[in-house]
Image (cartoon, rainbow, N blue to C red):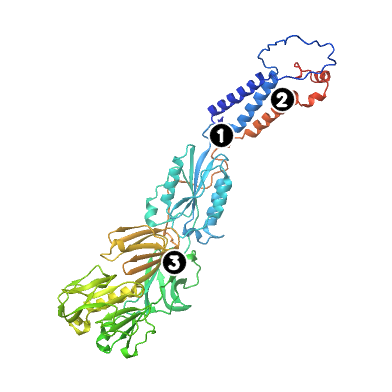
Amino acid sequence: MNFLNLSLGELFALAGIVSAGIVALYLLDRSKRRHMVGTLRFWVASQSPTEFKRSRKVQQPWSLLLQILSTLLLLLAIAGPRLGSSNGARNHVLILDTSAWMGARARQGILLDQAKAQALSFLAGLPADDRVMLVRADALATPVTPFSPSREAVIAAIQQSQPSASSLNLQQALDFAEHSQKLQTERVGDIVFAGAGRVSRDDAEGIAPPANLRLLLIPSAGENVGLRRFGARRAAHEPDSLDAFVALRNDGARPRDVILELSMQKKVLASKNLTLAPGSESESNFLFKREGDGPLIARVRSANGRSDAFPQDDSAVLDLPPDTRVTLTVYTNEPEPLRPLLTGNPRVTVSFVPPAKYDAQAKADVILFDRFAPPSAPANVNVIWMDPPNGSPFTVKAEQANAKLQNWHSDNPLAQGLFTRDVELPTAKVFTLAQGDQAVADIAQGPVVVARAGAVKMAALGFNPVKSNMRFELATPLLMANILRWMEPEAFREADVQASTVGTMSVALEKGTDPNAVHVVDGNNRPLPFTLDGNTLHFFSGAPGAVHLQSGTRESVYSLTVPDVAEATWKPAASVRRGVPGLGSGGTSSPALWPWLAALGGLGFLIEWFLYGRNSVMRVIPRSSARAAFKLPWRKAS
């Protein structure tokens, strides 16, 4: 026999304390009692009180025995005795496969419905004492219930389980189950896996099943062609076009003819007919004109109309960034020398306006004043001052003839990639730095290129680059590009968007990327942990959503919404146990004795109250009748 709630020592201690208390109450019962007499005439008052010494003995031993016995029976009921050995109950771990592939079609419902039915059948065959923990397994092993003999919580958790978007990491789930069982003091039960067992090819060869593993495998042979990766970016030389790629994989056992389509605004922009061999992967590239803003959709469908076992990966959606352009208005009397410098970038829309037609209310993202200071400055517009005259917001302290550039401040974003030295300028204006100004380029006498940050950004060039030897230098277009990128970073951000699978992502960064400039955030702008291995960045996302990777001027958006379907099915050794065991095959459940013990204890108290209670029904029965009726060898308490 064993006890569920109390140890044997705790039971003996409680029994001793309670029994001693009951005996003490019986021995200390010295209270006065009322006696009924016919008359007081024969009573004579004593001159002195007579002292009576009563012996310390139990007046009603049978009442005491009944109370102690009833109390011990109730304590036994509280202790929860069980017949059999103390190690009869076992701890089982039920691993339910909730990976993405469990959402594939089956004869009735989906594969997960069949796995749930198998798991419930296993629970029904367990002894009532056995404890079960439910673990949902996909890319992560997630415990849902603790070890508990209660079946209601486990059944409810099984029925509420849904397929995730990630693939199955079976080895991690088995390791977690073994570790959880080792932390318990009860006997180790089975580790039961209910699912299709679809894993990656690398994992399929390295899975080491534990000795107590039982498999409830769900057959899942189905033909499926699905999207694995999908990405798009602006075309390098055609700003109105998109460069897209789509990767498909055939997970079936026979070749499949499919049609791959890209659409936007409900209009098909590109399509291809493909034939995929069994187990193969194919990548297709597209170049097409962008049709406004909106999502770009990739969709694959069978060429012969044959149904697909897993339709969840037949389409993917990319939320493209807006097609942002920069409008640059140039006020100059000599537009032709500046035209080649400013119109080379397809993302910049340039308009040349004579200074006489200056309009302070004209709409523009950036305004360039060439040797011109307007009577009223434009409001909320970024401004480039080129060879500014008096009246500009920058103070000129000197004008130097035949000046040579000596230094570029590489820590300033306007000077990134600029290394030109000893370029002679016919004339250059030297600026006095005000509060908040930053020098970009210097001559011997001081700064000649200055940047001023703030709500409105401004930059000043103390010379006209196209009227000096700098027009032959690569630094000139780079300087203008840096200024425009600094003023309107969103328009020049190199953004590529990819739809990929949930899980671990590895991204190759450009050489020389500053680790401090790398940021990884989710769709709610919350930072995600990542690691850098050389020029390769690794991060993990266990749930569908968007992840933004920013590194300098480049931004990559990963839409982790494509279900991660593993490509192989685990084939365990023939020695691994399979199927649902017979009802109660793990041992019989010992009967619960506490209800009977509690009932006997209550019955004992009832009998004691009936025979010895002060207000019992025995008081309404004459003493002679009571003794005659019961023929008991003891007298009724007075």
Q: Residue at x 20, y 85 (%)?
A: 467
Q: Is residue 56 left or right of residue 98?
A: right
Find disc 2 in the rendering and name its residue: 608
The picture places residue 179, in percent across and down from the top left corner, at: 43, 43
Marks 3 and 1 close (CB-CB < 8 Å):
no
Q: CA distance from mark 2 to mark 3?
A: 79 Å
Q: Residue at x 43, y 77 (%)?
A: 293
Find disc 3 in the rendering and name its residue: 226
Residue 384 in view, yes or no: yes
Toward the viewer: 461 or 562?
A: 461
Quarter of the image where one finds residue 399: bottom left
- Which of discs 3 and 1 lies nearer the camera? The answer is 1
Residue 474 in view, yes or no: no
The picture places residue 76, in percent across and down from the top left corner, at: 61, 30
Q: Is residue 257 left or right of residue 615?
A: left
Disc 1 residue type? Asn
Q: Specify the quadrant that holds the C terminus.
A: top right
